[in-house]
Structure formats: C-alpha cells, structure tokens
Image (cartoon, rainbow, N blue to C red):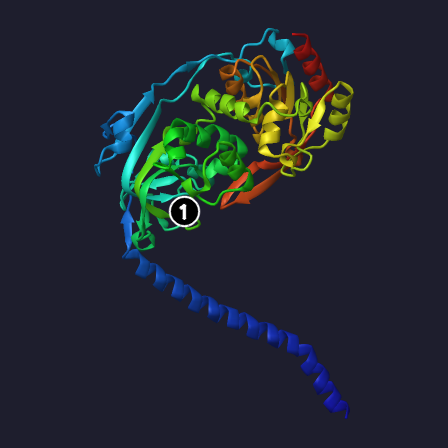
Amino acid sequence: MNIRRLFRNRLLRGLPVVIFRVVRKAKSLFAIYHMGAINKGTRASEKNLRELATINNCDRFTKVSREKLLSLKTSAPLVCLFSKAATIPAAQNQLSQSKTVFGNNIPAWIFENRPYSSKPIYAVRFSSCYIYPTWGVVLPSPTSIYEPSVKAARYKSPDLSQIPGMVLQGDKLSIDIERLPQHTLEGSYILLNHWGGKNYGHFLCDSLPGILLFYKEIIRGTLKILAGRLQRWQKELLRLLSIPAENIKSVDEDSCCCASLLWPSFLEDNLNQPSAFTRVVGDYLRGLAVPGNVGLSPELIFISRKGVLNRRMINEADLTARLKNAGFSVIAPENYSVEQQIRMFSRAKVIVGEMGAGLANTLFAPPGCKIIEIMPEIKPSMWIKRLCGLLNMEWYCIWAKVPKERRVVSIVDGIKYDNLVFTYNVNVDHVLQATQNAMRS
C-alpha cells in the first residue's frame, strides 16, 4: 500500500512537468508549421509585388486653368496653380518678450519674430488612380506613388509599410498589385483627408481649405468628396457647410480606384505653414455659426484638457481655480458641438490653453485676440504661433518643464516615443502674470 502511495505521489508531482513539456513541444511544432505557411504565402505574394516609382512633385504635369482642370478630358495628370508661396508676418506683440514669454531654458526660436513662407496653393487632377482614403496616399498608377500625398502618412508609418498592400523590400517600397481594387468609382472626386485628418486642427487647416476652394462644384454635385470613415464631428462640420450627404463618398475599404481625383495641396501639411486661405476657413465657418446665443461666447477662455490622459497637467485643478477667480470660463471643447465651439470662441479676447487641437479654435476668434499657449518642452510646435501671425493675434508662451521621470516611453507600431504620454506641472503664477499682461495690452 505504501509502495502504491509513494508511486502515485511521485506521478502527481511529475505530471505538471510532463504537461509543460508536451505543451512546449506542441507550441514549437505549431510555430514551425505556422512559419512555413507564412513563408510560403510570402513567396507566393512576391510574384505580385511591383516596385513603386516616386513622383516627387508636379513640375512635369500639364499646367492648366481652373476651368480646364475640372473639364479637360485627358489621362495625363493636370495641375492648376492658384497662388505662389507667400510671406506671412510673424505674430506681433505690443509688449516686450519678458512679458510675453515665461519659463527657463527656452529655445531661441520661441523668441524669434521672423515671417514664414507659406506653401504654394495648387490642385492636381489624376485619372484612373488609386487612393488610400484613410491615409491620404495617392498612386497615380499601379507602379507609382505621389510623394507629396504621403507626408502625413509618414508620421504614422515612416517607411509606409503599414499601408495595406505595401511591402518594404530592403530600402525599396513595393505594392501588391493583387490587393489593388478592381472596381472604379466613376465621376469626379476631391480627396478630403490625410492620415492626420482625424485630428481637429489638421481637419480645419488641411482638409477644409480644399473643400472651400471647390465649394461651388461640390454643392452642385459635379465634384464629390472622397473620404475614409468619418467621425461624428467631421460630419457635423460638413453639414454646417450645407454639403449634401449624397455628395460625400465615405469608403470603408483600405483603397479604391477613382476615374478622376483632385488632390489639393493643402493636404501637404498646411497646418504647420498656414496659407492665407486658412483665414477664409475660419471666417466662413464663423459666419455660419454666428449669430447665436451670445451668452455662450465668453471673452476670457481657458481650454481644459482634464479628460485627456496622454498629456496630463498635474496641477490643472489649481490653475483652473485661479483662472476662474480671474474671470475666465473653463471650456472642454469635446463636450460641445462644433457649432457651439465656433460660437464660444467668436468673441474671445484672451484664450489660455495647452498646445494641441483645442487651440485650433483660435481660428474662430477675432483679430487682436491674445493667445497664451502652454507648451510642454518635449512637445514644441510653431503652428499656433504662426496661426496668430496669420490672423493678426498676439501670442504668449508658457514654457513648461517635463522631468524625465514623468515621461512614459511608448512603442507605437515599432517606433519608440517619449513625448506621447507624460505628466507635468505648469507654473501657475507665470500663467496668471501672462493673462494680466495680455488684458492690459
């Protein structure tokens, strides 16, 4: 009996080890089989790969007038230049820099008041081309890619290999032609978005200018909008522009083929070098949303990011309380419709906010408004400063330190970042001093 018990105890003790070894062996065999299947599939798909030639600019395209851009029947790419690059003045403040910029170890460009050069405004028409609507990427042919259309996509995928059907072979980009769509969208379309179009600021500054440039044709239905899956607030903006839903083609598939496509140059990152046409977007939308309930249009605004977790201001509650005592209204833009946001900012005299999409509402504020931008040191950006210069507004900067121990290293799609998720404190006294200076000037 004792021998049986001893044998049973030893068997039970050894059973987990046996099970672990069997499972490990099974996983190993499955991995070998799975890798074989993957390699087999890769070898099979390599027959369909075609290297993509890069078209860097539109210099060789046929230059035409606006009328011919829309009507000329040809398979060759056409381009229409609406305006050349222009010099935009820098934001000018009436006060000295010691009263408009606060913080320590501030980079020199913060203090520079240089004008910048906006990019030329033009539109390209492609015939029988392929488009990735969500990415904003255009293939004029199955074996070529239009480089200006991929700038925003490279922020997400620097080598473009994450775009469905695209494969990186060494340093060369190829396309799996079997994954290109066979069905063609008939008619004429204008591309709405690029990869960053999901961001409120990029949508206002990069997407909508092209729509207003061809607004009459879109309203008539002779030119339709081509987009990926649209978010609620994007649809709301298009409704505010009175664009009929039937004139908007939202594509769920990765890519589509289009008989005729307009690509407006604003999609090449107009936000960071805003052209004068950006002002037209703000003025037009403000005219549609106002007049309204003036009570929803405070003169002193603090844009709260309390509900945003990736860049969290630890002492925002303290800043909020102090600003409320100074007469500021605290607004979380995501809690309001787009039309309400436009109306809220339409009478602002001083706006305080952290660098980000919420400050895109600056576009709807009147000339002379003072913008106080809280800028974490690891997220520097010039777009609000430049937008203030374009809109004849004054720009103030609160430079906020972000200690290394408060930075979370994130790996997104294989790329390491230390400036996406972090926490920081802002010097509340600096913000209050800036608001006082702004209200006095």
Reading the image, the residue beneath label 1 is 163
Near-viewer residue (46 or 320)? 320
Q: Residue at x 61, y 75 (%)?
A: 19
Q: Residues within 10 Å of mark 1 (few under 14, many from 20)?
A: some
Q: Quadrant of residue 157?
A: top left
Q: State the image coordinates of residue 379 (x, y, percent, origin top left).
A: 57, 29
Quarter occupied by residue 76: top left
Q: Answer with the quarter of the image where residue 97 lies.
A: top right
> Which residue appears farthest toward the bottom when viewing the image?
1
Question: Residue drawn at (43%, 37%), measured in percent from left and top?
Answer: 194
Tell me: 42 left or right of 400.
left
* Element marked by disc 1: loop
Is 300 in front, or is 185? 185
> In screen coordinates, is 45 left or right of 93?
left
Q: Quadrant of the C terminus?
A: top right
Residue type at numbered disc 1: Ile
